[in-house]
Amino acid sequence: MKYLMNLTMILLSIVLIGSCTAPSGETSGETTEAAASHPMGQASVQDDESDANILQVAMSSEAHTTLVAGVQAAEIEHVLVNAGPLTVFAPTNEAFDALPEGTLDNLLKPENKNDLATIITRHAAPGSYNQEALKKEARKGRKLYMATGDYLEVVVNGDEITVGGAKVIGTIQTSNGVINVVDKVILPN
C-alpha cells in the first residue's frame, strides 16, 4: 500500500510539475518554441543554495552523460527532480556502450521517445533504497517495485547487490532520493 501511495504522489507531482511551463529567465509573457514543445517544469529551476537533486547529480557526473542524454531525449527531466523519495538505478556510460550495436542510436531517435522513456523509467523506484535497504528487501524475499509497474529481483551475494541483474557499484544520497550506480542497463525480459 505504501508503494502505491508513493507512486500516486510521484505521478501527481509529475502532473503538477509538468504544468509549470515558464522557462527560467523569461522576461515576457511569450514562451519560446523550445519551451512550448518541451516544458521542463521544476527541472528548469536553478538554485545554488539547495542540495543537489537526482537530475543535478547525474548531470554533473562524467560517468552518466549517456543516461542524461537519454533522459533529455525522452523529455523526462521533471521525473528526476520531484520531491521523492525516489531511487534511480543509474547505468554508467559503459553499461550503455555494452548494448548491442545500434540499440542506443535507435532509441535516441525522436520517433522512439516513448520506448526510451519506458526503459529509463524502468530504472526508477518509488522510495529510498540505499544499499542497506536493498539488502533488507532481499532478505525478506521481496521484489522491488519500479515506476513502470515492473518488479525487479534484488539479489545479495556476499557484498555484491544486483537489481534486475544489474550490479550496484556505488550509492549517492541526493536531496530527493538515492542514486544507485549500476553496471548494466535493465531491459525488459
Image (spheres, rainbow, N blue to C red):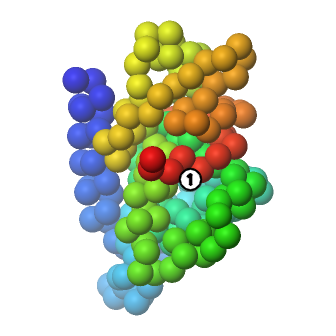
Residue type at the position of mark 1: Leu
| Residue 41 percent location from the top left of the image | 39, 64
Q: Nearer the viewer, residue 99 or 73?
A: 99
28 horizontally vs 172: left or right? left
Residue at the image point whose x is 26% and y is 57% from the top: 15
Residue at the image point whose x is 56% and y is 53% from the top: 55
Would you place residue 111 above or below residue 76 in this image?
A: below
Residue at the image point whose x is 52% and y is 25% from the top: 154
Q: Is residue 50 visible?
A: no
Q: Nearer the viewer, residue 60 or 122?
A: 122
| Residue 159 percent location from the top left of the image | 72, 17
Q: Quadrant of residue 7?
A: top left
Q: Quadrant of residue 175?
A: top right
| Residue 37 percent location from the top left of the image | 37, 82
| Residue 109 percent location from the top left of the image | 51, 80
Other residues around mark 1 within 10 Å, as few (<14) / some (14–19) / many (≥20): many
Residue matched to label 1:
55
Residue at the image point whose x is 50% and y is 16% from the top: 138
Figure label count: 1
- Residue located farthest toward the top when viewing the structure as drawn: 139
Q: Nearer the viewer, residue 114 or 126?
A: 114
Q: Secondary structure at mark 1?
A: helix
Would you place residue 115 above or below residue 143 in this image?
A: below
Location of the N terminus by quadrant is top left
Q: Is residue 118 visible?
A: yes
189 horizontally vs 62: left or right? left
